[in-house]
Image: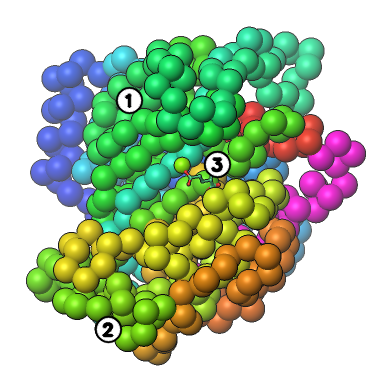
Amino acid sequence: MSFFAERCGAWGAAASERLLREVQERGLERVRVAFADLHGLQRGKTLMPAALQGALENGVGVVSTLLLKDSSDRTAFKVFEPGALDGLPGFGHANNLVLVPDPSSFTTLPWAPGTGWLRGDLFFDDGRPVAVEPRRVLRAAVEALAGAGFGLVCGLEVEFHVYRIVDDGLDPAQADWPGEAPRVQLLHPGWQLLGEAHADRAEEALAVVQRTAQGLGLPLRSLEIELGPSQVEAVFDPCDALTAADRMVAFRNGVKQALRRAGYHATFVCRPPFDNVMASGWHLHQSLVELASGHNAFVRERPAGRPDEATQWLSDTGAQWLAGLLAHAAGATALAVPTVNGYGRFRPNAMAPMAALWARDHRGAMLRVLGGAGDAATRIENRVGEPLANPYLYLASQVFAGLDGLARRLVPPPAAAEVYGGHGEPLPTSLAAALDAFAADAVLQQGLGAPLAHLYDTVKRHEIARHAVAGDALAWERREYFARY
Ligand code: GLU
Ligand code: MG
């Protein structure tokens, strides 16, 4: 009788043996096995070393509702009612999924002594892969792109907020679902963009961020003071899309835990629930690598076309990719900005976009084109996303949008001369409107797959409905997003 992992094609004998040896040699006391849920949050179990071999061979059972939860952890489907899960083949009455650890993902956690970590892939108990697992969705997207001869290269710029914890808010008498957020103090008062004195004030906390990112092997380039009170930014070197998404999840996960241990509260919510804040964006730099040659496929030899045409700066491939991102901007916003809170960011003159437009080196445009003829670093920066986006789903949306641009040889409109004040196709102004646009976008629906589209729509509308009936919307966002993400 073969192992479960063997039957579902996830077994590597040599890699598993190496891992078991390493865990023993390092004297690790425990190993966490995790996967990223629909919100990009890590979930899993902590295994004792003696249980690791069994887990590698036969996986770890986890309840399937883990993939059906909204941002408060409420299951958005009535899983015990007949027909409730018709659109999600394989999901049953809180049945088991099998989490199979991938030995190649092994790392130790820099903030948690004696603790190893493994990412797992989810399977149904008959060995079929769980297609709606977000990481699997991006893997499928990357494979489709490779079929066209390209790889997506992504560079991350992540804005977020870090506060000092004054009171943990963990009084058992106040426990609730979801619980109250900690009471916090600012790390720096803000309104001194890139100010060195602010960086100095924030250094103790930012050193924790640095050690965590580097300890996890993430290619951190810089840590910066952003404009808003207690707002900071981390910038990473580019890498392939799947690795970039893994790194975004690892960064958020690690930074929150490590800072918490040091007495700080990190949050990736776009607009923390205070009067005086600046919204956080997640700026996603992207280019294509030609897999055969290793060259940046967005680079052209010399400018072509009129002064406001994309071919001044980008190759024909780059211009088509740009046009694909614009054509699917409204639908992709549902994945780039997945919270009710994130839509408060789209304001004029706030360096956040309001319309599906592009322009050269323009921080008010959704797509900021950088580089130009002969420049190997030529790329498109998509400024639409918020840092809470599930990176697997957001990046997958970019792949399918861009691929459609290539397949149909779309030609982008001229560069925007003005970006605010009603110019260009407006971006959705609410999560509900973005979900409508996603539902109406056949390319994204097909790319991400009907089950994932159904799952995402149901979970997010569940969240919207709960927000709509909340008496105090700010308190809802504080508990639901600020405290937890
Ligand atoms: N915080 C702005 C945003 O919401 C971006 C500011 C910047 O360009 O650094 O995207
Ligand atoms: Mg910034």
Q: Which numbered marker is on residue 165?
A: none
Label 2 vs label 1, nearer the camera: 2
Residues 188 and 89: in front is 188
Secondary structure found at label 3: loop
| Amino acid type, callout 2 | Ala
133 horizontally vs 421: left or right: left
134 horizontally vs 313: left or right: right
Q: Label 3, label 1: how many angstroms apart (C-alpha)?
A: 19 Å
The numbered mark, 3 or 2, whose residue comes first in the sequence reads 3
Q: Is 228 rendered above or below residue 81?
A: above
Secondary structure found at label 2: loop
Is residue 123 among what the camera can see? no
| Amino acid type, callout 1 | Gln
Residue at far bottom of view: 408
Q: Residues within 10 Å of mark 1 (few under 14, many from 20)?
A: some
Q: Which numbered marker is on residue 280?
A: 3
Residue 287 screen position, x and y as percent: 29, 64
Q: Residues within 10 Å of mark 2 (few under 14, many from 20)?
A: some
Residues 65 and 162: in front is 162
Disc 1 target residue: 210
Residue 152 placement: quadrant: bottom left
Question: In the rendered structure, which segment of residues is drawn in magenta?
Answer: 448-473
Residue 471 placement: quadrant: top right
Disc 2 target residue: 304
